[in-house]
Image (spheres, grey):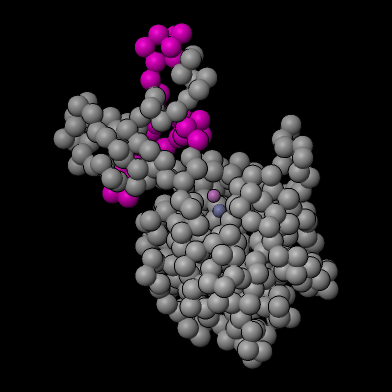
Amino acid sequence: MKELIKKLVEISSPSGREDAIREVITQEIKDHVDEIKVDPLGSLIALKKGKSGKKLLFDAHMDEIGVVVTHVDDKGFLRIDMIGGVSPYRLLGARIIFETGAHGVVGVEGETMKQAGEIMKSLDFDHIYVDVGATSREEAEKLSPVGTFGTYDAGFIDLGSRLVSKAMDDRIACAILVQTIKELETPKDDVYFVFAVQEEVGLVGASVAAFDIMPDMAIAVDVTAGPDTPKSFKRMGFKLGGGPTIKIKDQASVSSSKVVSRLKEVADSRSIPTQYEVLIFGGTDARGYQTTGRGIPVGTVSVPTRYVHSPNEMVDYKDVLDSVRLLKALAEEGI
Ligand code: CO
Ligand code: ZN
């Protein structure tokens, strides 16, 4: 499965620019599903038919965080804004790949030592720029004009049990859904797989994807924090390698208690390790489904992930494999 993960994480597709990743996922799954379509916003929706008459939905968002060019100056330096939650601190020193194919590096202002120190203390997008190697406005505008989208430019690293990439959020879940589609032979319920657009800019794709499906249960699959590093968030105890987490709540939604207990039940029945997760910040596409139509009971299955929204997001491979087992178990046992 590592090959599939590498393939999906290395694609650059920020929110609103999901064409490249959707094409690759389509090729991976099209021969393994009963129906497949793209909705008006660009989310990819596939169905594997069951026999119970009930509907289960699994979601992974295809988009990743990124940046957009807002201004090109006389000397050819770019100013940027964020697409989704991008920290300027994480951007410093990073490489950017733009949708035009242009590459850039991120620099920071500072005319005196004192000013440079003050800027670093409260770094924001007003004080950073991208250098695409241009020496004039004209040259830079050819490479990446105003409105051009970009993402971190960082390759996949296989550390053995741990895997690192710029876009584990949320391509690791895309890989989990693709693998589940390939392995799932006899779903009990109709299982819808939604590869949603624009999660990072406000759960946009998920908010409408289920409008004419109205599943009986929707599960978002996403990354969560990895608070098992030195002096990390001490109010959260889940860890990498402890199994996928079953979310109790985060800042955006409270999981349906029925969904939580059903997930725990099927996991335990197949000896799949899981951890409960109360995330003290953040949110997932679960919120988008929860408030669709007359309302949909939701839950989230997460992969514990260190350094989320950095160029080097880290997951544990065993958690990924156990997430596939968990989704398969629920699809086979029914909701
Ligand atoms: Co994210
Ligand atoms: Zn995510």
> Which residue of the protein is positioned furthest toward the bottom in this rendering?
51
Residue name at image x 61 percent, y 47 percent: 282
Residue name at image x 77 percent, y 37 percent: 234
The image shows residue 43, relative to residue 214, as above or below, that is above
The answer to whether any part of residue 306 appears in the image is yes
Q: Is residue 256 magenta?
A: no
Residue name at image x 24 percent, y 33 percent: 72
Q: Is residue 90 magenta?
A: yes
Residue name at image x 69 percent, y 61 percent: 255
**The N terminus lies in which quarter of the figure?**
bottom right
Residue 327: horizontal and vertical position, in percent?
67, 71
> Which residue of the protein is positioned furthest toward the front in this rendering?
294
Residue 91: horizontal and vertical position, in percent?
46, 34
Horizontal side of 19 relative to 190 (left or right) equals left
**The C terminus lies in which quarter of the figure?**
bottom right
The image shows residue 29, relative to residue 52, as above or below, that is above
The image shows residue 100, relative to residue 46, as above or below, that is above
The image shows residue 204, relative to residue 144, as above or below, that is below
Horizontal side of 249 relative to 190 (left or right) equals right
Number of numbered discs on residues: 0
Horizontal side of 283 relative to 232 (left or right) equals left
Quadrant for residue 323, please give it.
bottom right
**In terms of depth relative to the viewer, which is nearer, 23 or 214?**
214
Residue 62: horizontal and vertical position, in percent?
48, 60
Quadrant for residue 185, please give it.
bottom right
Horizontal side of 331 relative to 11 (left or right) equals right
Residue 19: horizontal and vertical position, in percent?
37, 62
Segment tinted magenta in the rendering = 87-116
Quadrant for residue 52, please give it.
bottom right
